[in-house]
Amino acid sequence: MARSRLTVVLSQAPGKHPGKRALEESIVAALLLEPDLEVSVVPNLYDLGPDHTGRLFLGSVTGDVAVLSWLYPRAAFWLLDRDGIKGHFGETKLKPPSDDDEDGAETDTPVDRPEAIGATGTIPDRHIYTLDLRDANTHTAFVAEVRRIAAECKERRQAKAASNAPVLQLGLAAKPEVPAHQQAFTPEALLAPAGRRWYPVIDYSRCTNCLECLDFCLFGVYGVDSLERIVTENQDQCKKGCPACSRVCPQQAIIFPEYKSAAIAGADTGAVGGLKIDLSKLFGGDVGDALSAAVQERDRELVNDGRAAVGMAVGVPRRQADKPAGPKDDLDKLVDDLDNLGL
Ligand code: SF4
Ligand code: SF4
């Protein structure tokens, strides 16, 4: 039976930042008063391992979901997808504070979209909305957006029910039920501590399955599924703090959600630090320089592991290897400036 309420999951910031905690608490307190929502809180989404109750809970939800986290929407959506929590991307109207163009209508620089392989597996008929908790300073903006999403989902369900005669859900609003298996997820269990993790997230709406990341990573993180599509096979073998392969991916499809640079952390096209940015230019402005940085980062991790550095000799995409590592141009400087901003 279709769920009648929107599930809202708030993913806490790692650490105990008082300002972030205060915002989280005020959002949850307000949402708990809303009749059409089922609200839960989990630790930082990115840190949830496969056995964490928060992850199991997310996996048990079958209807529409809104996830509020301190991650970029694109990063959170594909992170959930990798964990098997799949759905159609729900568009949020909340935008970063610096993105103040009217209604966000056709204001982003058009970007060439690669012929991507798209989400893998079966995509259930539901929507997953991912909201970035950095997009507003007060709880009211998030509460208003969640209300809007709940109304949008309800409308969609009603339209679907109307087209699926005979309708069997006329008494739907009377008493929304929570499936028995979900009642087992107590707030305490959902909030069990989760250790910090570090791994790449693939944005399949951009990935073309070129497998360059598979060749480049020498730590066994990537693999392919039964249809020869790239997957992060051994997530936790990734080297903490290193984003090397994201610089090598020709489609900017590899996200490290907690990396200091917004572009690598999953910011989409649009405003970063008040500047309009085209990701393809940001990463591809000087391929040679990005590749040099990636090779250095990989060598550092190899040496830390007691292995020999390999430089450009192994796993460097032929497409990029012959590009000179030229001097930094303005675009690279911009990347560095963004890094320094710690966005
Ligand atoms: S390098 Fe990028 S586009 Fe190529 S397979 Fe890996 S994630 Fe996909
Ligand atoms: S960051 Fe380094 S270790 Fe992690 S997946 Fe990429 S290349 Fe492999």
Image (cartoon, rainbow, N blue to C red):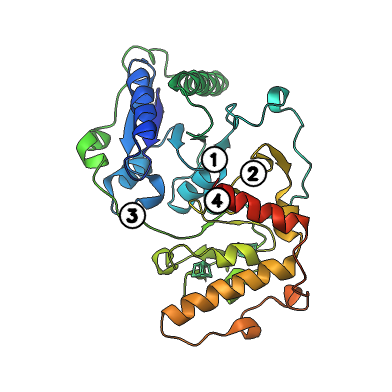
Q: Residues within 10 Å of mark 4 (few under 14, many from 20)?
A: many
- The span from disc 2 to disc 4 (Cα, nearest Å) is 9 Å
Q: Earlier in the sequence, mark 1 or mark 3?
A: 3
Q: Earlier in the sequence, mark 1 or mark 4?
A: 1
Q: Nearer the viewer, residue 31 or 323?
A: 323
Task: Tell me the residue that label 1 is attached to.
Answer: 73
Answer with the quadrant where ligand 1 appears in the image. Answer: bottom right
Q: Earlier in the sequence, mark 3 or mark 2?
A: 3
Q: Are marks 1 and 2 in contact (CB under 8 Å)?
A: yes
Task: Tell me the residue that label 4 is attached to.
Answer: 265
- The span from disc 3 to disc 2 (Cα, nearest Å) is 26 Å
Q: Nearer the viewer, residue 171 or 124?
A: 124
Instruction: Name the residue at 52% across, 63% down.
Output: 231
Q: For ligand 2, tell me if the residue under mark 4 lies within 8 Å.
A: no
Q: Are marks 4 and 3 in contact (CB under 8 Å)?
A: no
Instruction: Name the residue at 73% across, 66% down.
Output: 287
Q: Which mark is residue 49?
A: 3
In the rendered view, does 195 fall on the left or right side of 299?
left
Q: Mark 4 belongs to which amino acid? A: Ala
- Residue 170 point in image, percent of width and height: 42, 13
Element marked by disc 3: loop
Q: For ligand 1, tell me if the residue under mark 2 lies within 8 Å.
A: no
- The span from disc 4 to disc 3 (Cα, nearest Å) is 20 Å
- The span from disc 1 to disc 4 (Cα, nearest Å) is 10 Å
Element marked by disc 4: helix
